[in-house]
């Protein structure tokens, strides 16, 4: 075999191995990528109640209702709020402590399952914040004193 043919054979075999490796990696990553759906998207799709999904949107102003319930012997906080994408809305039920950044009018991503068209049981609540974060210590400095 000529040197040129050997080199072509080595390069092509390395390229085939590389492509097989990349396809295996991308196939396995496909199941681990997690995106979130807006309320409009989640209501259009046929999602089963057993499927774990992420729902994202804005917390509707005036929609947060908190109450204490007992599960077993423990008192826990149950929170009901509405997530909207300004077209459709879904009620979210969450038992647990909410993140500090969670508030009305803020972006939020919740992970859980859709019970029916109007109810979403959340297991995890992730509050989003804007990119203009200012620590409280620096916030007082930035405001002019009159």
Image: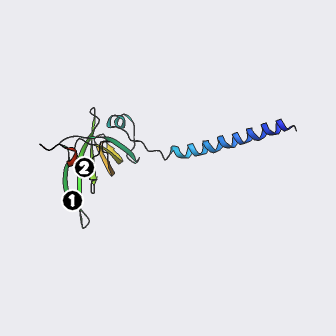
Spot the residue most to the top.
87
Element marked by disc 2: helix
Give residue 34's mark. none
Q: How many numbered marks are there?
A: 2
Residue 116, how many percent across, how many down?
A: 31, 42
Residue tagged 1: 69
Judged from the image, the secondary structure of the residue bearing numbered disc 1 is: strand
For mark 1, does the 10 Å Cα neighbourhood hold few (<14), some (14 to 19), or many (20 or more) residues?
few
- Where the N terminus falls, by quadrant? top right
**Mark 2 Cα-neighbour bin, 10 Å: few <14, some 14–19, many ≥20:** few
Name the residue beneath numbered marker 2: 138
Residue 75 quadrant: bottom left
| Up/down of 23 relative to 125, above or below | above
The picture places residue 26, in percent across and down from the top left corner, at 56, 43
Quarter where residue 132 is shown: top left
Residue 11 is situated, as x and y percent measured from the top left of the image, at 74, 39
At x 22%, y 44%, the residue is: 142
Dividing the image into 4 quarters, which one contains the C terminus? top left
Residue 60: percent from the left, percent from the top? 22, 40
* Residue 22 as seen in the image, left or right of residue 131: right
Residue that protrudes farthest toward the left in the picture: 146
Residue drawn 49% across the image and 47% down it: 32
Q: Nearer the viewer, mark 1 or mark 2?
A: 2
**Mark 1–mark 2 distance (CA, rounded to whole Å):** 39 Å
Nearest the camera: 60 or 69?
60
Q: Earlier in the sequence, mark 1 or mark 2?
A: 1
- Does the CB distance between marks 1 and 2 fall below 8 Å? no
Q: Does 68 appear above or below 73?
A: above
**Of the pair 133 and 33, the residue shown nearer to us:** 133
Q: Residue furthest right?
A: 1
Q: Nearer the viewer, residue 144 or 54?
A: 144
């Amino acid at each position: 075999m000529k040197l040129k043919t050997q080199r072509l054979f080595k390069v092509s075999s390395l390229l085939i191995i590389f492509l097989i490796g990349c396809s295996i990696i991308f196939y396995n990553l496909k199941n681990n990528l997690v995106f979130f759906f807006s309320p409009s998207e989640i209501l259009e799709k046929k999602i089963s109640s057993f499927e774990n999904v992420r729902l994202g949107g804005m917390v509707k102003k005036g929609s947060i209702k908190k109450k204490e319930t007992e599960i077993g012997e423990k008192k826990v906080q149950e929170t009901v709020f509405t997530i909207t994408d300004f077209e459709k809305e879904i009620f979210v039920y969450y038992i647990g402590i909410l993140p500090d950044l969670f508030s009305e009018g803020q972006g939020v991503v919740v992970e859980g399952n859709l019970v029916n068209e109007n109810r979403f049981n959340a297991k995890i609540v992730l509050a989003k914040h804007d990119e203009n974060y200012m620590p409280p210590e620096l916030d007082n400095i930035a405001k002019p004193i009159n």
